[in-house]
Image: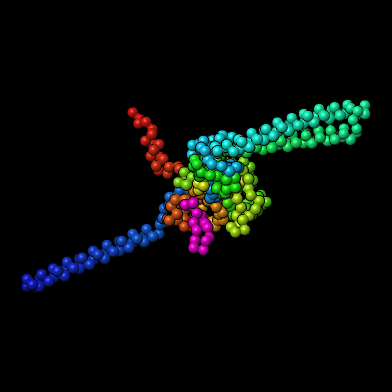
Amino acid sequence: MPSLHPPARRAHAVLLFSSALLGSAFLSGCGKSGADDQQAGQAPPPQAVTVVTLKAQDVTLTRELAGRATPSLIAEVRPQVSGIVKGRLFEEGGTVKAGQPLYQLADLEYAADAASARAALERARATLQQAELSARRSGELVKIDAVSRQDDENAQAALAQAKADAAAAQAALQRSEVLLGYARIVSPISGNIGRSSVTQGALVTASQEQPLALVQRLDPMYVDVTQSSSELLDLRREMAAGTLKQASDLPVKILLEDGTTYAREGKLAFTDVTVDPTTGSYTLRVTVPNPDGILLPGMYVRALVGNGVRNAALLVPQQGVARDPKGNVSAMVVGKDNKIVQRQLEVSRTIGNNWLVDKGLNAGERVVIEGLQKIGPGAAVTPTEMGAKPAAAQATANAAAQPAKS
């Protein structure tokens, strides 16, 4: 082989090195392509998902309704006679008993009228006694013709008139004593009394519109809530179809303004029979114990009212139910071969964190609630019941729990 000059030898070496690099890259690319082809031919491993096995159970259907707390009894304290307020006999904001004096009016005039009526009654009684004696004497004398029959009749008529005058005087005395008693204004009921609208020295009249005070019975309390009449029709339709069973004496939970649950449960007292034409709703009244005075008149509350009991109902966690833009509801169900099947559902309402399923699912089926983003219809999965540990983690935990062999 002829000798090459130094520049030619360098160029020849570079050419050989480049050829070697190209060959190595070609072989590497072929090997990678073969590996990718091999991976593409293998099926992906089953996806791990968390499921819930549906169980039929009796569910109480409730409806959250807004309302206001009202006293069970309300009495406006009003004057029944006119007069000057002599004194207030109660503490504002306190508790009063039925018949307890609340106000004292100046009663000198009423006391004088009562004394005058009492004197008139005594005079009428004296006249009656004299008329009785005259009538008795005349009756005896007429038998022996000592007086004329006309004189005897006049004596008997005078006796009857004296009796009537005495009865009228007695009634006048009673009326004057009643008016005298009205000068001391008492509480008509037992309960909590608010602030007084008048002070000592104020003039009150029997025909005034403004009450002197307000007495309210706060234990128990009423909670008046409203419900749509269309919901009532739906409930009656479900009861007629047999899907809903009416339950009596269902407890009613009360939610306070801050969202907390009231400690004591209420009871549905009555349902109004009239629908408000302006709102299309009717009123339900709930009786709630209130011994601690937590509920106050006018307080906004919400009531969880039980409408009925659905037997053999199915509840699905909300995270396991999907809704598409058209409003269709579906869920992913694990079949017997651990493959995903998509089910179209009909749901009516939420109960807590669950959907109440009307159609589309059966008891015993497994609904996927976690891992939904990585699966689709027909996908193979490895299901794990909610609350249970995966098989690998459970095996590790069991091995760690076993004592070491010596």
Does residue 286 lie above or below 402 as drawn?
below
Asked whether residue 234 is in view, the answer is no
Quadrant assignment, res 18: bottom left
Residue 354's x, y, as percent?
Answer: 51, 49
Residue that appears at 80% across and 29% down: 132
Viewport quadrant of the C terminus:
top left
Residue 287's x, y, as percent?
Answer: 58, 42
Please name whichever residue, 272 or 44, is drawn nearer the observer in this view of the structure. Answer: 272
Number of marks in the rendered image: 0
Left or right placement of residue 163 versus residue 111 in this view: right
Please name whichever residue, 148 or 400, is drawn nearer the observer in this view of the structure. Answer: 148
Magenta segment boundaries in residue numbering: 316-332
Residue 232's x, y, as percent?
Answer: 62, 53
Residue that appears at 60% across and 59% down: 278
Quadrant assignment, res 5: bottom left
Please name whichever residue, 394 or 186, is drawn nearer the observer in this view of the structure. Answer: 186
Left or right placement of residue 6 versus residue 189 in this view: left
Residue that appears at 84% across and 27% down: 136
Residue 63's x, y, as percent?
Answer: 56, 49
Viewport quadrant of the N terminus:
bottom left
The colour scheme of the drawn protein is: rainbow
Quadrant assignment, res 405: top left
Residue that appears at 39% across and 38% down: 397
Does residue 125 lie above or below 318 as drawn?
above
Can residue 104 be found in the magenta stretch?
Answer: no
